[in-house]
Image (cartoon, rainbow, N blue to C red):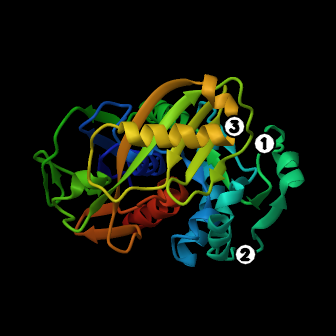
Amino acid sequence: MSLKIAILGFGLTGRLTALALAKEHQLSVFEQDNEHASNSAGSVAAAMLAPLAESVLCEQDLALEGLNSITRWQQILIELDDAVYFQQTGSLVVAHQQDKGDLQSFVSRLKPLESYQAQALVGTQIADLEPELAGRFHQGVYLPCEGQLDNQAFYSASFKKLTSQGVQFNFGCKVELNAHQVNGQSYDYVFDCRGLGAKEAEPLLRGVRGEVARLYAPEVNLTRPIRLMHPRYPIYIAPKPNHQFVIGATEIESQDRGKVTVRSALELLSAAYTVHSGFAEGRIESLQSGLRPAFANNRPKVTKQGRVISINGLYRHGYLLAPKVVDDAVSLIA
């Protein structure tokens, strides 16, 4: 039976929810931004799928769900009409000699995930994986099951697919949610995917700030995500198609929605330069910041109150956990 469903928010979870429901139901999407939702956490993110690396900061059950979600991502992307870059060739964690202790601490906190485990590397093995890092690092760790996707391409392809499926979009609009009514219109179900936009309904939500630089660096040829361990500003470098790179720090406990600070930009770019000197001639295409929605326990939460189903609190695990969390939410209308 086809249902009339409203989806509030068109970020990562809103898009995945719409893709899961559009084949069988009549959907209306409400988003206060435009179709790009460029202020959403999913738009700013590097879209890394890193269950082993994230196991350092989350419980094992979430890391295992993240591992399973990588397969779900492949199923989701193949149904889109436009190709979206997806990669699963593992990730590389490195540290300069003076930061060897930070690398060892990171490795000691990794949790086992089925048959996957970290593989310690010496300098020659690092060079085998990433030839352009030859001679730059003498110790590292390879995390074999990890991957990434191109979030910008996913945002574009998902909007195009949903448009072709007849989804009704309402951009640039505020939402008044009253039971299962949205702006005075009744729906069979409402999916609230607004993240921090739902803070009035979820007062325990907090924002966790993330900052990223997007670069065009034709002199850099890194083939997989790289993490640099550092006591002050550990960073990640995620290579995207056409010599595009997303460089970011892990997290900042702040509700600040302001633009990237000079200090953060200098730290991000300086650290990236120590990984590969080719970034010096790269072009800065954007500096972005965003707030990830999180609860006190840093775990995602799906709740159902009447006909309103809420998805929230994905913290820094958005792309890693979103397919599983959305599947759980959608199953509540079965």
Q: Is residue 49 above or below residue 328?
A: above
Q: Badges 3 and 1: C-beta atoms under 8 Å apart?
A: yes
Name the quadrant of the N terminus: bottom left
Q: Point out the tag, 1 or 2, that comes first from the N-terminus.
A: 2
**Gap between marks 3 and 1, in whole Å?**
7 Å
Q: Report x, y in % for residue 328.
A: 45, 67
User: Which tag, 3 or 2, sits closer to the chain's start?
Assistant: 2
Q: Is residue 83 visible?
A: yes
What SS does tag 1 mark?
helix
Which of discs 1 and 2 lies nearer the camera? The answer is 1
Q: Residues within 10 Å of mark 3 (few under 14, many from 20)?
A: some
Q: Residues within 10 Å of mark 1 (few under 14, many from 20)?
A: many
Where, quadrant-wise, is the C terminus in this rendering?
bottom left
Residue type at the position of mark 3:
His
Return the residue nearer the eye: 74 or 225. 225
Q: Which of the 4 image quarters holds residue 26?
A: top left
Measuring from the top left, give residue 99's x and y in whole percent. Answer: 64, 60
How far apart marks 1 and 2 lie (CA) works out to 30 Å
Q: Position of residue 284 (x, y in %)?
A: 51, 25
Disc number at residue 276?
3
Which element carries disc 2, helix, strand or loop?
A: loop
Q: Are marks 3 and 2 in contact (CB under 8 Å)?
A: no
Residue 43 appears in the picture as rendered: no
Q: Check disc 1 and report the residue beneath it.
A: 133
Q: Amino acid at mark 2?
A: Glu
Q: Earlier in the sequence, mark 3 or mark 1?
A: 1
Q: Amino acid at mark 1?
A: Leu
The disc placed on residue 114 is: 2
